[in-house]
Image: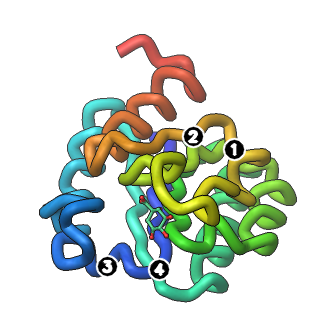
Amino acid sequence: MKTVFVLNGPNLNLLGLREPGIYGAHTLADVEQLCAKAAARHQLALRFHQSNHEGALIDWLHEAGQLQRQGELAGVVLNAAAYTHTSVALMDAIKGAELPVIELHISNVHAREAFRHHSYIAPVAKAVICGLGVQGYSIAIDAVAQVLLGQTT
Ligand code: DQA
């Protein structure tokens, strides 16, 4: 069974409380349940994490890289939150391990402030999903299974 990582960056622990007009009413626990269902649908094991610390996200990307080298990684869904717009270190971690990453945002970052239009992740990602609300997580896991792994179910 291959593993899909879903990694969440800073402030996403406050989903449900934080700017609900932008991010909706669902909590991070709701998102984890959504991801668990999607992973089960495709017979993938799920590693779901959130951290407010850049280094913790990098450590999980390195772990994903280890699985990748063992042929056990399905892919990574990464909502790096604000680090998307600032982190060369996250970009380097993805590039260094040649990780199959889907960049994800709950909101449509392109319809928001100009500083959210640039992503350090996008150039090293397989795909970018944004603006679909938390449902985007489920769709991203479907994409990992159907596009990155080529599963037909
Ligand atoms: C976000 C968009 C980012 O610009 C922002 O900093 C976040 C969340 C999203 O999911 O829409 O924290 O990644």
* Residue on which the image places disc 2: 128
Q: What secondary structure is found at the residue carrying circle 3? A: helix
Amino acid type of disc 2?
Val
Cβ at disc 4 under 8 Å from ligand 1? yes
Q: Nearer the viewer, residue 111 or 29?
A: 111
Instruction: Measure how far apart labels 1 and 4 are at the Cα level.
Output: 19 Å
Q: In which image quadrant can residue 125 be found?
A: top right
Residue hosting label 4: 10
The residue that disc 1 covers is: 125
Tag 4: amino acid: Pro
The x and y percentages for residue 128 are 57, 40
- Whole-angstrom CA distance, mark 2 to mark 4, is 19 Å
The answer to whether the residues at label 3 and label 2 have Cβ atoms under 8 Å apart is no
**Left or right, residue 75 beside residue 69:** left
Which image quarter holds the N terminus?
top left
Q: Tell me whether circle 1 and circle 2 mark residues in contact (CB < 8 Å).
A: yes
Instruction: Tell me which label, 1 or 4, sits earlier in the chain.
Output: 4
| Label 2 residue SS | strand
Q: Which residue is mark 3?
A: 13
Mark with earlier residue (3, 2): 3
